[in-house]
């Protein structure tokens, strides 16, 4: 039986939600060996200002951090809480926020791009503003949801192109060319186009990759319409998955790291549509290990274990300038049974269960 005792890891992209969901979700992150998390700001209302005392009705970073800390987040060594980039975000906010230490990251959402993303501004507007320079000058990291917005269905997702490919072909090169010193994380990339973009740009550009995009393709989503696999950006084709797998299994790669985009929904499917997001809280390292094996690695080999550790445990803290964890947890190749997670606001269905599987090949040792 293969066991991997590895450093605790930084989930560089997750959603801890709010209300009765925060506590069980934060617990699921800690249970799966996280010593650090980045909690995305698409709450209702969004985390759109830095301090409570600042103008406006949006939540502040200060407030959101308190909520998470009081829900068990105080057990984490690091909590990263980006500001939601809205039309109200100003260069002064960035300069003051960075000085205060509260503002370390800003999240770009395409307008109406995903769950609670109604406040985003178009990338063209961001590029023309004084915001990227203020971020770059003050060491604030930009987290990007890289999908073009406002597209017709045939451009949004079709055989020749899709919203992510358009974004990484038309928007990102301009941003990186204009602001080469800006640190950027391309969140949850799904395509070969985005992967190649990250590979071919400077070392200030990195990317998170989710378990579902390493494990599944759009065929898995469509076969039986497995709506629990519906997330944004949507899972793509086998050649895309292969590009992601190649990227994460390249020895000594430093640009790609784990960010689960785990996103709980108590009501995933409605009569007229489906909420975007896959829940992988509690089981993400297990799913990543499964994906690395499906990509052809033998995790009992020391060199292959190192590739896994680079992706899961090393690259994200290194990019963010957070120290790596000195604590460890242990993954073992022993099947684990999955069940729904009860919360005060209803049950959450973990992704494998939503795919019709109540058992996964890896587990976390007690
Ligand atoms: Zn997300």
Image (tube, helix red, strand yellow):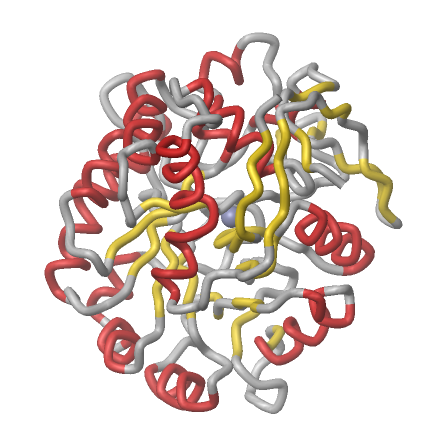
Q: Position of residue 80 (x, y in %)?
A: 52, 67
Quarter of the image where one finds residue 227 = top right
Q: Name the quadrant of the N terminus.
A: top right
Q: Residue at x 24, y 38 (%)?
A: 166
Q: 152 or 10: which is nearer to us? A: 10
Say if 98 sits above or below 276 in the image.
below
Q: 261 or 325: which is nearer to us? A: 325
Q: 94 or 212: which is nearer to us? A: 212
Q: Residue at x 11, y 59 (%)?
A: 177
Say if 356 sits above or below 8 in the image.
above
Residue 196 relative to residue 31: left or right: left
Is any part of residue 108 visible from this angle?
yes
Q: Residue at x 28, y 17 (%)?
A: 159
Marker count (numbered): 0
Is any part of residue 276 visible from this angle?
no
Residue 127 relative to residue 242: left or right: left
């Amino acid at each position: 039986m293969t066991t991997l005792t590895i450093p605790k890891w930084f989930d560089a992209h997750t959603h801890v939600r709010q209300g009765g969901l925060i506590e069980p979700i934060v617990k699921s992150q800690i249970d799966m060996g996280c010593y650090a998390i980045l909690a995305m700001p698409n709450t209702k209302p969004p985390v759109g200002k830095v301090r409570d005392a600042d103008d406006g009705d949006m939540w502040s970073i200060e407030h959101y951090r308190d909520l998470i800390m009081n829900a068990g987040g105080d057990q984490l060594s690091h909590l990263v809480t980006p500001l939601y980039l809205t039309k109200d975000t100003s260069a002064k906010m960035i300069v003051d926020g960075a000085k205060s230490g509260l503002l370390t990251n800003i999240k770009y959402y395409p307008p109406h791009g995903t769950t609670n993303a109604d406040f985003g501004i178009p990338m063209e507007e961001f590029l023309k503003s004084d915001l990227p320079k203020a971020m770059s000058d003050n060491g604030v990291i930009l987290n990007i949801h890289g999908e073009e917005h406002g597209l017709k269905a045939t451009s949004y997702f079709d055989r020749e192109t899709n919203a992510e490919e358009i974004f990484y072909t038309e928007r990102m090169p301009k941003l990186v060319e204009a602001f080469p010193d800006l640190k950027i994380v391309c969140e949850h990339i799904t395509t070969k186009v985005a992967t190649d973009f990250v590979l071919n740009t400077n070392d200030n550009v990195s990317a998170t990759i989710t378990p579902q995009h390493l494990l599944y393709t759009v065929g898995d989503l469509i076969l039986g319409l497995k709506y629990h696999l519906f997330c944004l950006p949507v899972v793509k084709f086998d050649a895309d998955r292969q590009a992601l797998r190649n990227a994460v299994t390249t020895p000594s790669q430093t640009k790609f790291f784990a960010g689960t985009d785990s996103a709980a929904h108590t009501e995933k499917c409605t009569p007229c549509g489906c909420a975007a997001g896959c829940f992988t809280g509690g089981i993400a390292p297990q799913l990543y290990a499964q994906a690395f094996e499906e990509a052809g690695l033998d995790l009992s080999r020391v060199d292959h274990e190192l590739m896994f550790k680079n992706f899961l445990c090393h690259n994200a803290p290194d990019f963010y300038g957070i120290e790596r964890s000195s604590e460890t947890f242990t993954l073992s190749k022993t099947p684990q049974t999955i069940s729904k997670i009860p919360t005060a606001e209803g049950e959450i269905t973990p992704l494998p269960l939503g795919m019709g599987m109540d058992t996964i090949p890896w587990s976390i040792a007690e």
